[in-house]
Structures are given as C-alpha cells and as structure tokens.
Image (spheres, grey):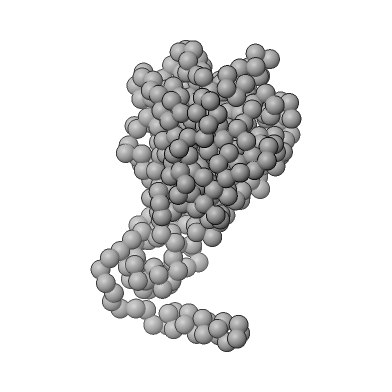
Amino acid sequence: MKIKNLLIILFIISLVTLMPIKSYANKEKNVIVEKKDINLALQNGCTLVKELKHINVLRCNEDVALMLNLQEDLEVFAVDSGANTQIKANLVQDSGNMGLGRKVVVLDSGYNYNHAELSSSYLGGKDFVNNDNDPLDDNGHGSHVAGLITADGVNSNAKGVAPNTGIIAGKVLNAQGSGSFSSIIEAIYWAVDGNDGVYGTQDDFNADAISMSIGTNPPYTYSKTNCDNVLPSLTAAINYAISKNVAIVSAAGNSGGAGVSIPGCISNSITVGAVDNKDAVASFSGKGKTVDVTAPGVSLLSAWTGTSYVYASGTSMATPVTSGTIALIKYQHPSYTVTQVRNALGKKGFDTSYGYGRIDAYSAVNY
C-alpha cells in the first residue's frame, strides 16, 4: 500500500513538471522557495519577489502554492531595572562579570546606536528591510530589547543584564514592527557567517547567541507539539546556527494558552516565557511543550527611539534578559557549548508555563 501511494505521488509530480497549470483563482501570497524548486514554481505562474542567498521569495497563486507544497512567507511581529535583582544578575555584576568581550546578535526592528545607553555596545549591523548596512531603529522595540541586554545604566533603573556585552544588530522588522521570515532566515545565516556569507573567515561575528523577540499570532501558535516542520527553511537555519555553537533565544510569544509562536516553537531554540516581579507567569506568556525557561518580562524599563526610555511588557522583554544571562555565562565559561548553556539556564522540573524554571543568573554562571 505504501509503495502504491508513493508511485501515485511521483506520477502527480511528473505531471506537474510537464504540464504547467494555466489559470487559477486570483488570490495570491508570498512563498519561500528553495533554489532547486524555483523553475517549477515559475513555470506555474509564480513571479520572483526577491532573490536571497539561501532562498527566494515568490508571489504565487494560492492554489499553485498548495499544489507545489510551498511554504508561505509568514508575517512575523515584535511581541511585546528590577529584572537584574530578580534574577541575581546584580550579584554577578558585583563580582566583576559584566559580559565583557561577549557578543549577542539581536534580530529585531534595529538599534538606536545614538542612545546614551546603547552607543558603547554597538558592533555594527545590517538592515534586511531596506537592504543596507544601517540598522537604525525606526520603531523602538529593537532598542528596548537591546537595552535589556547591554544598557550601561546611565539611568540606573534601565541597566542591562550584561552591560559590557557587544551587540550586532540585524534589522528584520520595519517601522510598524512587522517583517517576514524570509528576512529572518537570511539574517540568521548572516549572524553566523558574517557579511561575506562564508563561515570560518575573519569577518565572522563569533556571537554567543542570536536573540529574537519576534513571533507569530494564532493560528500559528503551538501548545502540544513543536513546529519544526511548519517552516523547514527556518528550522534548518536555526539548526545551522546551533551547529556552529551559537545559541538561538526566542520569545514564547504573547498568546497565552493558545501556545508558543514561531520561532519559539522550534525544538532547538531556547524559548523564553515571561514572569512578573513576583515570579508569577504572566497571563499573556505563551504556554506549551516548547517553553524552556522563564524570565522577568513585565513593566521593564529600557531605551527607545531618540533619547527616550519606556516601560514595556512581553516575552519580548524576557528574551533579552535571558540572552544577557547567556553572555554572563559565556564570560565565565567561554568554552561552554549551547547544550551546556541550556542546562545552566534551567534546572527545575518541567511544566508548560515555566519550562525548566525562572532563570537565575548567579546560579547559571556558577553552574
């Protein structure tokens, strides 16, 4: 029976190859297409939107996309101090560990490198929205996220977890705080391989983590399972980063019991939920099988656009608190693998709200 079904599938594929479809309903969407599949998609009426190094984005009729099993280029959104004391990062800082020499790539809405809290930590970046080398933040979310990692403490209530850590900024979200996974996939490879796109050369960033405070809305949330097969190209990019010993830290999303958003629902991501200042899981925090740890994410003060500061809540805020903790861990243990870092972050019994527990930077550094 299995062999017969396989033959039928292969026959259908051969028909598709030989006889492009001529007409369909008018509804179209952007899809992600691997290089090897582009000709077949073009034969069936798709048009090229953008050609990237690892994938292409095409505009296809929905019926064609379904027939060719093409992945939609889903829209992704930004998911929206006292945290240092709560996770005992202040004790780590008091010991002299401020994350000096460590690096985190932040994929978000950009970086306000003119802000007093952030200017000293900027190590360059790239804008994947406007396709240039200036990732200046025109939304604010990315700067808030970055500040929770590395703010210098000019405003003492906004000091980051690892103030001396360097930030490489990949702007993947626009001024409205939304973007596409095609840009994120390219940005992950860039974060690992550097500007020349070749791993192991002098321009590699050698970052400790890629921090992504981004996610999808329902129905693209998952509570009982992972989402590794939903966007295989994204899963492959995350696995590639981890294979080069770069941790992926992702927000669990803000959909509560509806589940964990993409990319947090991908198995090998370190996925972060949010707690308040009393360690209670926030009602909005994405819950599910793929939550790994939780961190403070309610009413945290950080940098924004211009010279401003704002308070914000979300798993977006919990994610950089965790990324900053990874920088502290790597300062103390520079040879740690991603697996060792993951183990240091969470050591309690698992549940779908807290993961393996609320992070404790002091315990993690001394793991």
Q: Residue at x 43, y 44 (%)?
A: 255
Q: Position of residue 247 (x, y in %)?
A: 61, 40
Q: Residue at x 60, y 24 (%)?
A: 87
In this view of the protein, can residue 119 be seen by the observer? no
Q: Position of residue 330 (x, y in %)?
A: 67, 30
The image shows residue 76, relative to residue 348, as above or below, that is below
Q: Position of residue 95 (x, y in %)?
A: 68, 15
The image shows residue 310, relative to residue 255, as above or below, that is above
Q: Quadrant of the C terminus?
A: top right
Front residue of 42/362: it is 362
The image shows residue 332, relative to residue 63, as above or below, that is above
Front residue of 166/317: it is 317
Q: Residue at x 44, y 22 (%)?
A: 301
Q: Quadrant of residue 248?
A: top right
**Residue extending furthest left?**
26
Q: Quadrant of the N terminus?
A: bottom right
Q: Residue at x 43, y 30 (%)?
A: 313
The image shows residue 85, relative to residue 129, as above or below, that is above
- The answer to whether 325 appears left or right of 133 in the picture is right
Q: Position of residue 146 (x, y in %)?
A: 48, 28
In this view of the protein, can residue 155 be seen by the observer? yes
